[in-house]
Amino acid sequence: MTVTRFAPSPTGYIHVGNLRTALFNHLIARKAGGTFILRLDDTDPERSKEEYADGIREDLEWLGLTWDREERQSKRLDRYADAADRLRAAGRFYEAWETPTELDLKRKKQLNMGQPPVYDRAALKLTDDERAALKAERGEGVWRFKLDQERIEWEDGILGAISIDAASVSDPVLIRADGQVLYTLASVVDDTDMGITHVVRGSDHVTNTATQIQIMQALGFEAPSFAHHSLLTGPQGEGLSKRLGSLALRDLRAAGVEPMALLSHMARIGSSQPVEIAGSLDEIAEGFDLSHFGSAPTKYDLEDLKPLTARYLHSLPLAAVADDVAAAGVPEAEAEAFWSVARENIETRKDIAGWWELFRDGATPLVAEEDRDFVAEALALLPEPPYGPETWGEWTAAVKEATGRKGKGLFMPLRKAVTGRERGPEMAEVMPLLKVKPRV
Ligand code: GLU
């Protein structure tokens, strides 16, 4: 049974970077007919906010990334305390009292001497008396996991064979001095308690994975399989973090990006497969395979989403946009005709209302100075609405005869006068939708 999870911290909204993690884990579970868990990593009581938890659910629902179960780390603190006790009993957990400033100083010294800035395990060498004195002076210390200094190896679902020398990694702090359990331990306990079979996350977690594998071993747990997807960069290869604010999913939603365009794009960038717009998440899941992805940073350009959104909308039948069409005020009887005309000419759903306004109220005509008389003469030949499918042909034939104009010189000024735009739908289809006669 395949079980995956998406484990955001509710300390902010989801952005495109963590969408990738959410999507991959969702797809793996769905493709295998398994379970997808939404896990809120909320052990930090100060930074975790209910508002963000709600926002995360809302964003996932918008995308259709449904989850089978929700878990919260803040409800599982006793499980973490239990694991901590077992690590202590196994001699793999030790208390340390260095302040952040002291640690920083140590790191600087190491770097100056050309050594890797790895925690020197000074706390392990303390005598009982020294420990008691530090505790009396500084109170509770942090709890560090004592890594076995050997190579940690796993076959990564994306990166391939990984081997990390534990001696090059600091013993991770798993519990803070104030007693707060940190993600590194909580995640290990959750992943094993919840039977997670595949952990897919960003490559910024590779070192975490190495330490978590050892923590799992120390607790007698079997490690799941791990895969680390590359991180997204901006179009020029620059870090995405500076712009993360503007790439929050709720901002994309507000900008009119279509979920299916976003998901189709996200499921393919950084892989050997071309971006194709899918009709459903099931379809995306069917073709999804981690082995198609590479380790190189993946360029992400928000601009790509605009044409994808437009293309997706152009492919939709009325039924898929019926709510938006009705909300724009289009009467049901005209909805089909309206959509067939408007569809190819919108970039987002937000443009739907604009086209209906144009038909209902008339456009602001676009008339070049030199066409002013011609357009006025032409409009005099156009009767009042209602118009039919034959109106455009009959009208332009009459205008041609009266003015001698033909081809583009005939049609373009009339299109611009009627729609206020240079490009747009077939005029023969536009005319029957017009409620008012164009005026200049
Ligand atoms: N809360 C962690 C994060 O957002 C989860 C990482 C993981 O998937 O294990 O980075």
Image (spheres, rainbow, N blue to C red):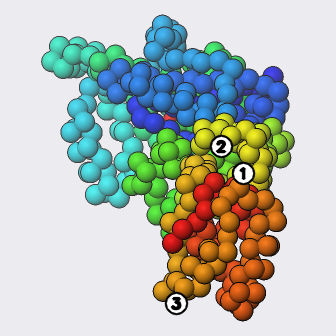
Quickly name the residue at label 2. Answer: 330
Judge whether residue 36 can be spotted in this image: yes
* Secondary structure at numbered mark 2: loop
Which residue in the structure is indicated by mark 3?
Answer: 370
Residue drawn at (67%, 70%) of the image:
382
Alpha-carbon span between mark 2 and mark 1 = 8 Å
Q: Quadrant of residue 323?
A: top right
The percent position of residue 217, horizontal first and vertical second, equals 62, 24
Q: Residue furthest bottom?
A: 404
Instruction: Residue at 61% x, 62% y: name it.
Output: 437
Could you say whether the residue bearing mark 3 is in a helix, strand or loop? helix
What label does residue 338 carry, if any? 1
Query: Tag 2: Cα neighbours inside 10 Å, few (<14), some, or many (≥20)?
Result: many
Discs 2, 1 touching: Cβ within 8 Å: yes
The answer to which of 43 and 388 lies nearer the viewer is 388
Q: Residue at x 48, y 25 (%)?
A: 54
Q: How many marks?
A: 3
Q: Is residue 138 left or right of residue 235?
A: left
Label 1 is placed on what type of residue?
Phe
